[in-house]
Amino acid sequence: MSDTAKKRILFITPYYPPEIGAPQSRISELAKKLKDRGHEVFILCAVPNYPSGVIPKEYRGKFLIKQKINGIPVYRTYIFAAPNKGFLKRLLTHLSFAAASFLAFAKIRREINAEISIVESPPLFMAFTAIAMKLIFGVPYIFNVSDVWPDSAVELGMLKNKFLIKCASFLEAAAYKFSAGVACVTRGIVDNIRRKNVEFRRVHFLPNGVDCSFFSHEKLASGGYDADISEFQAKFGLKDKFIVLYSGTIGISQNLGFLIDIAEKSADKEKIHFLIVGDGAEREKLEEKVRSLGLKNVSFERLIPKAKMPALISLAGACVVSLLDIAVFRGALPSKMYEYMAMKKPILMFAAGECVELIEKARAGLASYPGDTAAALKNLAALAEDNKASAEMGENAFKFVSENFSRDVICSKWEKTLEKL
């Protein structure tokens, strides 16, 4: 990209570090890459609150706070904070940020002087903010879709009211209509949106990715994670175990009750231990299931600092990707998958659709259909018992992800898209 093509880019998102999660990592790392390549980058986000629903003391009682993170100006504004539980509370949370972010932008727009904004969805309510900024202030936007709403909410049974579904679908269509472009993190999302009569040329495949210098198997080999690894091993008594790791959101979508079923069927395998790291609406239910079954081969841990994630992943013999099989998830590519692959870990997958196709193309793991216990147990045994095959899958995983989904590769795709607008 030439020097004359550098842009002033504003990201608008409810999610941003110090919060931990896939959107937070994806947005912050892309923003940093764009800044490093000479673009002027700004962030307008909510005060930290996710997923606990608790705003840290230093952020309370202020409508707008300006910070600098990695040299990037970050403007934080109000959000009605609520735990990531309960559909209505989450709706109020999303609506509050949509309104507050527009008011905050109106206050700082001359200071930022953005040429284009990149607006995160979900939440779909960010369409209100994006459209208002476009119509009132003339700022074009890219609608960055990581999950298709309201489709996901309808298929998960979270949204059933026909009138509300119609309203949400109208807002979704408006978001695409007024946008300068629609960015999609999977090809399944691309296909979904193009079926909704959005112009082919305005829909772009811009997937998630991974920073291979942060999730570094080379640092692992040189002993750079040894201290953190020892800490985890001591905490959970995991030394000399084959660890099956799930890390990420613990919600309905992830179908982790099935992973507990697999753990129950593997209870006689002393070598195998299941470690579930993360938080979400289904966590307490899963913990209760483990207690009621009396399972000793399952441990839970809350969210851990991002700096310790490479060490956590390096403990694993296999890393789990699990999704319900509903139409909208057949076009999903969970971002944790890329981090596992960067650390040369084979994937144990319970899913259907695009993520299975990717793993099979990369020869980076073993996949089975959600709910197929026999196939899942067979795949787990294959990974746990054949070290050579597992190591080969790990090598394949790294080669594939570094060539196709590194942050540098994805940033270049974003630059090409921005250049066309």
Image: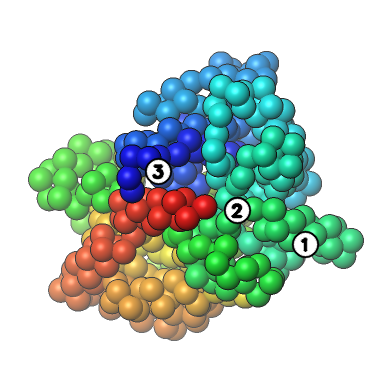
What whole-number distance in Å separates the C-alpha atoms at marks 3 and 1? 35 Å
Residue at image point 60% right, 32% down: 46
Name the spot of residue 140 as percent of width and height, x first: 61, 45
- Looking at the image, which residue sits at the far front? 4
Dots 2, 1 in contact, CB < 8 A: no
Determine the secondary structure under disc 1.
Answer: helix
Dot 2: element: loop
| Residue 271 visible at all | no
- Direction from residue 47 to residue 163 in the image, left or right: right
* Mark whose residue sits in front, 2 or 1: 2
**Residue 67 visible in this rendered orientation of the protein:** yes
Picture quadrant where residue 392 is located: bottom left
The answer to whether the residue labelled 3 contacts the one labelled 2, judged by CB atoms less than 8 Å apart, is: no
| Amino acid at circle 2 | Ala
Which of discs 3 and 1 lies nearer the camera? The answer is 3
- Under mark 3, the amino acid is Ala
User: Mark 3 vs mark 2: which is more N-terminal?
Assistant: 3
Residue labelled with disc 1: 169
Nearer the N terminus, badge 2 or badge 1? 1
Q: In the image, is residue 152 above or below residue 360? A: above
Residue at x 27%, y 44% (from the top left corner) = 214
In this figure, which residue is indicated by the disc labeled 3? 5
Name the side, left or right, on which 372 lies relative to 168.
left
The coloring applied to the image is rainbow
Circle 3 residues within 10 Å: few <14, some 14–19, many ≥20: few
Cα gap from disc 2 to disc 1, whole angstroms: 19 Å
Q: Position of residue 350 (x, y in %)?
A: 46, 73
**Measured along the vertical axis of the image, is residue 44 above or below residue 292?**
above
List the residue tagged with mark 2: 180
